[in-house]
Amino acid sequence: MAAWNVEHIPPQNGRPSQQGRLTIVTGATSGIGFETALALAGAGASVILASRNAAKGAEALARIRAVHPLADITFKGLDLASLASVQDFCECVTWENRRVHLLVNNAGVLAIPDRRVTEDGFEMQLGANYLGHFALTLRLLPRLLAAPAPRVVTVSSLAHRSGRIHFDDLQLERGYRPWTAYTQSKLATLIFSLELERRARAQGWDLMSNAAHPGYARTGLQSTGPQMGRSGPGLMQRVGSVLEPFLSQSAANGALPTLFAATSPEAEGGTMYGPDGFYELKGPPRRAHILDHALDRDVAARLWEVSEQLTGVSEEPFRQAA
């Protein structure tokens, strides 16, 4: 696994690479999401770039086609800070009656300085990073379960290590801090990924749910700092110019844990993949360390229940429709 890269994306069912597999990548117009979409398109997958900005979507399509002229790629608008947009996106995919082989929950926002809310009234980082992906995944369950051996890969962060779920003030109305909000949202995405795997096993679904994190990847999500630490990006802005070459890696390398989780026969459900290096900041993909508080099943069950209540989206009808 130490030398794993995009050239190791394996064939599926005897066909070259990912041919015939429909993939949805959220936040695919830049950073980790773009590199993930680029690699999967190059491996033959049919890729939907799901993002809010149509102009950036057109640019991303052009960039991918410049590298892979025959790539089967499309752009579909998706604003994860809007439950209505999530519903519209999923209804479009359902109407097309296509099986979804891979969903990559990648999109995210980082450490917004002032508290903002989504159009549904959720704290922005919790809403865009977590609740939007929760609703998206559940609404796409019938299309996922219609495909052979589907996977859901949810991109978390090293920041989960310092996060906790504030059930007494989930929207952080009484004590908003940018890093508190971000770490809560990234812990929530990881807990969701693990709980989805548990529910898939309990239901006997042929679905794998796992997680990935990019370490300290140089993307548009943060200015210079890694997704870690108490002070967010500002801390590393003061020392990043010196340390960045030693601690960070490119967005393309940061996407490798996601790609491993998404495609490798060695990848397992209910786990997370990250870089194989100091503090998991950079390096080729390996199984990552998950802190105990992310493995608490009582917290996971409670978060799932609260998420259903907040989004109005429940697993049950979509499971029955699958």
Image (spheres, rainbow, N blue to C red):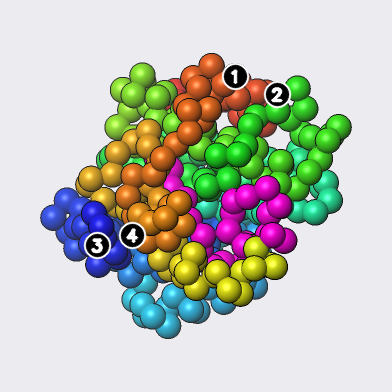
Q: What residue type is labelled 1?
A: Arg
Give the residue number, with chain letter if any, for mark 2.
Answer: 167
From the top left corner, tell me how far across and down residue 283 is, in percent. 37, 61
What residue do we see at 33% from left, 70% from top? Answer: 42
Mark 1 vs mark 3: in front: 3
Mark 2 and mark 1 in contact? Answer it, CB < 8 Å. yes
- What is the CA distance from the residue labelled 2 to the residue labelled 1? 9 Å
Which residue is the extreme one toward the right? 174
Provide the secondary structure element on which disc 4 rests.
loop
Q: Which of marks 4 and 2 is nearer the N terminus?
A: 2
Q: Residues within 10 Å of mark 2 (few under 14, many from 20)?
A: few
For mark 4, what is the residue? 284
Residue pointed to by mark 3: 3
Which residues are drawn in magenta? Answer: 210-235
Q: Which of marks 4 and 3 is nearer the N terminus?
A: 3
At a point 52% along the width and 47% down the height, the residue shown is 158
Circle 1/circle 3 CB separation < 8 Å: no
> Against 297, is 272 above or below?
below
Query: How far across and how far down the image is residue 257, in percent?
Result: 38, 54
Q: How far apart are marks 4 and 1 (CA)?
A: 34 Å
Q: Mark 1 points at which residue?
A: 302
Q: What is the three-letter code of the residue carrying label 3?
A: Ala
